[in-house]
Amino acid sequence: MAFQKHVLITFLTVLFLCVWVPVVQGQPGSPFLDPGAPTYDYDMALRLGMDVKLLFPSATPDRIIVNLTADPLSSIAVNWRTDTSKVLGLVEIAEATDGPQFLQQVRTIQATTDSLKVCPPDEPAVVAHYHAATIDQLVPGKKYVYRVGEGAHWSEWFQFDVPDPEKEGLSFLYFGDAQNEVKSMWSRVIREAYRTWPDIDFMLHAGDLINRHNRDIEWGEWFHAGAYIHATIPSIMTPGNHEYGKGVVLSPQWQPQFNLPGNGPKGLEETCYQINFPNLKVISLDAEQIDESPYFLEKQVQWLDSVLQHDPRPWTALTLHYPFYSTKPDRDNPKLRQHFKPIIDRYGVDIVLQGHDHAYGRGMVSNVASGSQVVAGAAGTMYVVSVSGPKMYEVSDDPWMDRKASNTQLFQIITIRGDELQYQAYTATGELYDAFQLKKRKGKPNMLINKIPDTPEK
Ligand SMILES: [Fe+2]
């Protein structure tokens, strides 16, 4: 009798683990994940000339990306996509070793899994499971390996380094709009950037990563273009106007496919947030919500003021999609300056990284002429507009720009070490196009040392 009872308990336990556990492992919002393999409309995709490998998920993880967390010295966030046959997502993590010994010390972290169906007009529906996990207990300066997947379907092992700003400083790449022809023509920029500066700590995308907010094929192109770089170097991104659809609706893929901090104003999770390194605070503002919503404008004004008020960090970088000062002749964003410039000036934000204008321009905006707000004395803030994709607009003659370029795809590297910030902008072919240095001075605005190469303006 006791034996029969034991068999029954074992049977029920196995049944529970096999059936119930995977089903309830989804996000609280989606407890009933569809465990069946979906059928996708390959005919329609092929008829439309779409790359079905980029569009439809499979049981093998794709679109793998690491994001910075709010506390990037102790944790990293990872996201990936599968088809709906995978209701469970796992991360295996270990400290990297020279040989395969790390396999003996693997720690497993279970992801949350969320189901998403997108069905843009005139395109095949894509239903996918997005898996999100935070890898914690990391140590600054150490190298780790991780892979994602489950059962018979795993990614390769990716290696990443946890920054150690005290010893090595901090470096990051900044990209303006990718937006169009992302697979075809943006890929070379992110790859050249990574080839030139492989030791960076993170990448920052200043909005308009894609062109149409809900088109899954465009996100597929963005992930394809960055390929394993997305899975190796953590990213942060701020949304642009093209990540929003009619009615100010955020791209349905944004929150499922990224794992960005939710520490900004309520309702702007993963679009307005802060990241805190010991020597640098990075802030993302949601520019489209500033432009479209008086409520979220006010919320972001209050929030920005509150996070900068008692910040002990020496350096602050702010990113948002719309520029405070435009490079395009017929564009201007006075609302931004009216509401946010006083805060930037008051707390001495060091650098503002922007996109949207599809050209390059940067300057400190001291004593600028008409077309931009005249400021009383420089606050030492450097404003930059850049573009990484192939869509190009004309650049104006506005004197706020110390260096400008039209018809040029670029990437930028910013390095912070002690009381110095080094900035370099490179063209898509790897030519140094612009450079400067900022130096901290006690009680005074940053000192600017221009290091513009002696090459013609583009
Ligand atoms: Fe834009």
Image: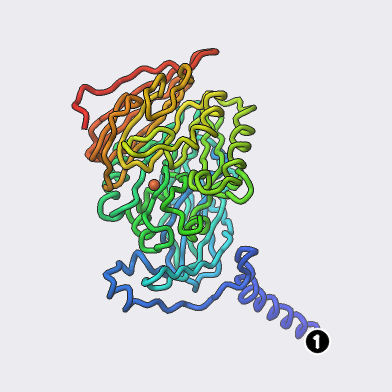
Given residues 23 and 255, the one toward you in this image is 255
Residue furthest left as drawn: 456
Q: Is residue 202 above or below residue 447?
A: below
Residue drawn at (54%, 67%), measured in percent from left and top? Answer: 115
Image location (x, y in percent) of residue 224: 34, 56
Q: Can I make out residue 376 in this image?
A: yes
Residue occupied by mark 1: 1
**In which quadrant is the N terminus drawn?**
bottom right
Instruction: Report the number of discs.
Output: 1
Residue drawn at (42%, 72%), measured in percent from left and top? Answer: 125
Disc 1 crowd, CA 10 A, few/some/many (<14, 14-19, 20+)? few
Residue drawn at (63%, 28%), measured in percent from left and top? Answer: 309
Image location (x, y in percent) of residue 386: 34, 37
Q: Quadrant of residue 406?
A: top left
Q: Quadrant of residue 184?
A: bottom left
Residue drawn at (27%, 44%), measured in percent from left and top? Answer: 392
Amino acid on which disc 1 is placed: Met
Specify whether tag 1 is near ligand 1 (CB below 8 Å).
Answer: no
**In which quadrant is the C terminus drawn?**
top left
- Disc 1, SS: loop
Image location (x, y in percent) of residue 19: 62, 76
Image location (x, y in percent) of residue 147: 47, 56
Q: Can I make out residue 96 in this image?
A: no
Given residues 317 and 79, the one toward you in this image is 317
Residue furthest right as drawn: 1
Given residues 34 and 60, the one toward you in this image is 34
Given residues 214 and 287, the one toward you in this image is 287
